[in-house]
Image: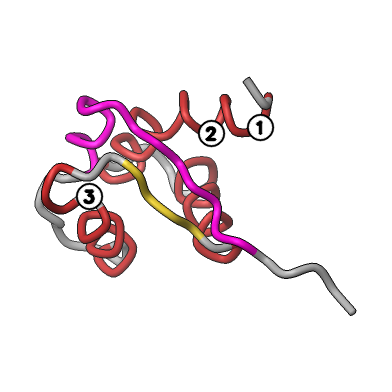
Amino acid sequence: MGRERRPIKITLTQSEADELLVPAGEGGHQQLQDHLRSQLADGNLTIQLGDAELGKIIRYMTQYGSGGFQGRLQRALRRPLTVLISGE
């Protein structure tokens, strides 16, 4: 019997959340960006991610160049992901 998977909760600062609240542009990332924006609605600063979503975000941040969305992901999530990984 495997472990029950729980969503990963990431709390952002307002300026980090603002990076993700920019209206979606064109390209293949709109679904992910819309998902993140919906979680940040009404001033919420916490997003919940499953394993697949976290993997997708890391791929966007590290493998897909330096486009607008990729840069916003890096600015928004670099600090909280570092905290998550380091356990601070």
Q: SS for tag 3?
A: loop
The image quadrant that residue 28 belongs to is bottom left
At 34% from the left and 33% from the top, the residue drawn is 12
User: For the view shown, which residue lies furthest in the bottom direction?
Assistant: 1
Image quadrant occupied by the N terminus: bottom right
Q: Amino acid at mark 2?
A: Leu
Measured along the vertical axis of the image, is residue 84 above or below residue 2?
above
Q: Is residue 14 left or right of residue 2?
A: left
Q: Amino acid at mark 3?
A: Leu
- Pointer 1 residue: 85
> Measured from the top left, where is residue 14 in percent x and y?
21, 28
Cα separation, mark 1 vs mark 3, equals: 22 Å
Residue segment shown in magenta: 6-20
The image quadrant that residue 69 belongs to is top left
Q: Residues within 10 Å of mark 3 (few under 14, many from 20)?
A: some
Q: Are marks 1 and 2 in contact (CB under 8 Å)?
A: yes
Q: Residues within 10 Å of mark 1 (few under 14, many from 20)?
A: few
- Pointer 3 residue: 40
Q: Is residue 49 left or right of residue 84?
A: left
